[in-house]
Image (cartoon, rainbow, N blue to C red):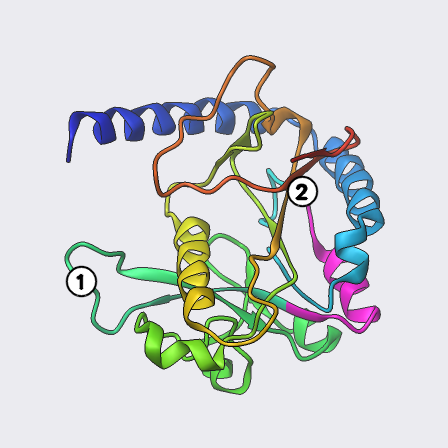
Amino acid sequence: MSDGMANLRTAKKELRRLVRQNLSQIPEHSIQSQSLAAHQTLLSLPEYQSAKRISIYLSMPKGELTTRSIVADALRQGKEVYVPYVYRLAAPTSEGPASVMDMVALHSQEDFEKLESDSWGIPTPSESSIASRKRCLGDGSLDDESSKEDMHKLDVIVMPGMAFDRRLARLGHGKGYYDFFLTRYQGLLKKSSGSENRLPFRVALALKEQVLPEGQEIPMGPSDWYVDALIAGDEPVLRV
């Protein structure tokens, strides 16, 4: 690892520590009120209203905006709703990740309510149910040729994060799941057929306390993705 990459990782790790410390001080009533405000703002976006296929992160029990009501609204409107599914690769390479993320479809509100929580307390589709679900990136392989024709393209992706800045840079939790997912998605788009070969509208939800003050920036590397819009509590939408 180069000195530059090592310094980048160190800077991100320290920023996550500081943000995590701040988040631990936020009372639950503030998280709930900010979640409601952000939910209402998201539902007012034209990109959300016109979306037919949307992925939504499922929130942790504490420390981030809740998304249960957003999932319920999208399903009620008849949108196809996809949620994150993390799995281990059968044959990971020495240079690549051992685990990756895809987005898999929910069947219904009842299906959503029956999801069991993982070790983080996040509702997650069971491994045994995956074969019956549509997968955004196809068969789950890292082989673009085997996945591109089975791809289910998203209109909107609702993303979490640890911290954001006013350039719409995003700091994740350190696993790289969303960055690698978007990179794979982009790669498949370049190889797939059809007229709708565009990236999904990337909108992040955050607590106000997760947005860095004016003038401070998230350290970004070449594989890190920016978002198209940021909704932070009851603040005005930041967007490109």
Quarter occupied by the C terminus? top right
N-terminal label among 2 and 1: 2
Q: Residue at x 35, y 29 (%)?
A: 13
Quarter occupied by the N terminus? top left
Q: Residue at x 77, y 41 (%)?
A: 38
Residue nearer the viewer, 176 or 209: 176
Residue nearer the viewer, 160 or 225: 225
Circle number at residue 65: 2
Circle number at residue 147: none
Cβ atoms under marks 2 and 1 closer than 8 Å:
no
Nearer to us: label 2 or label 1: 1
Circle 1: residue type: Thr
Q: Position of residue 236 (x, y in %)?
A: 78, 30
Circle number at residue 93: 1
Residue 70: say if magenta: yes
| Residue 237 occupies quadrant | top right
Task: Find the magenta span and give its range.
Answer: 65-81
Q: Is residue 99 above or below residue 130?
A: above
